[in-house]
Each structure stands twice: as C-alpha cells, then as structure tokens.
Image (cartoon, helix red, strand yellow):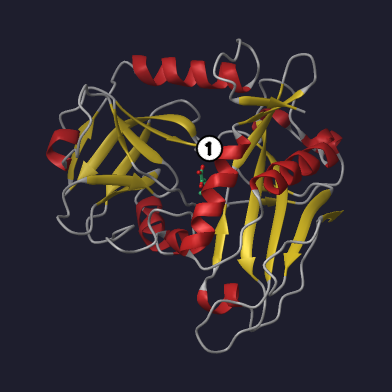
Amino acid sequence: AHCVIGCQASLATNYMETSAVADLDWENLGFGLVQTDFMYIAKCGPDGNFSKGEMVPFGPIELSPSAGVLNYGQGLFEGLKAYRKTDGSILLFRPEENAIRMRDGAERMCMPAPTLEQFVDAVKQTVLANKRWVPPTGKGSLYIRPLLMGSGAVLGLAPAPEYTFMIFVSPVGNYFKEGLAPINLIIEDNFHRAAPGGTGGVKTIGNYASVLKAQRIAKEKGYSDVLYLDAVHNKYLEEVSSCNIFIVKVEERLVSVDELLEADEVFCTGTAVVVSPVGSITYLGERVEYGKQGVGVVSQQLYTSLTSLQMGHVEDCMGWTVEL
Ligand code: COI
C-alpha cells in the first residue's frame, strides 16, 4: 500500500448541547459536538513551563481580542479516541504519538509544548473525568481534542507571550454519514492544501481553515470530501480535507493522479474517519468508480483489524493501547 501524507479538516456540522447521558442516541452519534462535563486547561508563561493543569467544567474560555491564536493563527490541534471494552474498561490508542506530533508542531509554530508525560497524563485525566460519555462498546468512541494556542496578547507579528494547552472531549460515531459504505471524492485542482516550505506537515489550525471553501463547494455538489493534488506539479496525490488517502498498490512512491484513476481499491484513513472506502473520484469532470461490489477487501480487513484492536477485542501485540 502506498501512503500519502495527510492532515485532516472538516466542519462540525451539528452541535448538540446535552447534560444527561441518558438523552444521547448512541446509535446515531455522528461527528457533531456533544458537550461533556469537564475540560483540562494548563497555561505557560514566558518561562516556557506549563502549569500543573486542572480539570474545570466544560465551557467558554476567556481570550484577549489580541491573542496570538486569533490574530495570527498560532495554534495546533490533536485528535485521538478512547474506546470502551466489553468489560467496561477504557482503552486509549497510542496517545504518546499524539504528544510527539504536538511537540513537533509546536516547534514549527514557535510555541512551547507540554512534555509527553504531561500530555498523556492530561488525556487520561480528561477521559476519566468524562468517563460516563465514553460510548458503550461498538457504539462509537470518545473523541479527544487537545489544543495548544498562543493565548497571550500580541499586536505586531510575533510569538505570543503566553500559551494555553487544553483538552475537551465528545462522544462520536461515524465521521462520514456513509459509515463504512464507500464515499465519493472530487479532486478540486484549483485548491491546494500544502506547499513546500509551508506548514502542511504539522497539525496547525490554519491548514484546516484554508480548505473550508473547497470542501463547501464539493459538498454543495454532493461529494463527501475533496482530494488535493500537490501544489508544484498539480499531479501527485496529497490528502483529503479530513483524512489521509491510501491506494491499494504494491509500491511505495509518489502516485500521480493518472495512476489513481486506475487503482483497484482506494480508501481514506484518519483518527476521525477510521477507515473509509472511496466509491468514486471525480477529476476534470470525469467520474471513476471503485469497488462496485461494496467495501473493498483491504479496506474491510484494515477497518476490522484496527477497530478490534482499539476496542480490545483482540490481543494487542504491538503495545499500542493504554488501559485506563
Ligand atoms: C483527524 O482525524 O486526524 C482529523 O484531524 C479530523 C478532524 C478534521 C475532524
């Protein structure tokens, strides 16, 4: 399989304010925000060290209109999931990898980062404080959204003097309404996601704002999402707004859009989307269809292997899950 580097973005399409877990329809969760009980917050001043951090009720935060994140987009986000096992216990999937990615992104965005230990500990605390919102096994997961932002006031273009590290959570189901049924993508070749020397390689918030227009145009035409081509040649596959893309082939190298159109099977991956088979891709007005028999063999195998591991249904020989 050839992996094309990816970041993800999307609009949260619905907002559900709920105070009672009993009101939740676990069968139809989707990917809208469900307000939970607590969020984690820690601050870092000019000394570069984050405060111990505390759990506070979920709610609005106060920011100066001059905050670095609001004016110059100095911010990063992360995403990971907690799953409930059949015995009721809760599993995290590779949280340290998210901590490492936030640390690396912070370096690119001139921000201090929480230590890997503080990040993982904060994730655990936030999940445990909101334990009642982790869906029953097989009904979805608790999406965990860590944020790191320049919360200090600036006016001229410069790194902020203060940073906030926060985590909130929301129970989620399928990202795409299609679930595991194939999705339809379009290549909008007038829009690009990343450019050499830019910030495409880190999970900064601006990468996501910049694709909202392409995503909106695609949705208005009835597509699930947009597949972007590279900014230099307008030819090699990069990623989808909200997830990575994989083409089922045997070589690892750049894949051009012409080859993509000849693939046997295509699927997207991401924390939010998990594994999502692609049913068609439209490029320059031409629609190419994949997997007329439904979900492809590789997509199905990967989906089953990954989610069985995340839900603790199979033994974790890789040491990837963390039990709370
Ligand atoms: C991810 O799954 O990695 C994302 O960033 C998804 C997010 C855009 C909702």
Residue 308 position in % (x across, y down): 58, 16
Disc 1: CA contacts within 10 A as few (<14), some (14-19) or many (>=20)? some
User: Disc count in the image?
Assistant: 1
Residue 47 position in % (x across, y down): 70, 71
Residue 160 position in % (x across, y down): 60, 77
Residue at the far bottom in the pictured view: 156
Q: Residue visible at 28% across and 34% down?
A: 280
Quarter-of-image position of residue 56: bottom right
Foreground of the two, 120 or 115: 115
- Left or right: residue 46 versus residue 186 is right
Say what secondary structure mark 1 lies in.
Answer: loop
Residue 295 seen from this side: no
Q: Residue visible at 32% across and 32% down?
A: 246
- Left or right: residue 86 versus residue 158 is right
| Residue 51 against residue 235 in the figure, above or below | below
Foreground of the two, 218 or 46: 46
- Quarter the C terminus occupies: top right
Amino acid under label 1?
Thr
Quarter-of-image position of residue 4: top left
Residue at the far front in the pictured view: 47
Q: Residue visible at 57% across and 89% down?
A: 155
Residue 169 position in % (x across, y down): 71, 45
Residue 311 seen from this side: yes
Q: Is mark 1 within 8 Å of ligand 1?
A: yes
Foreground of the two, 106 or 56: 106
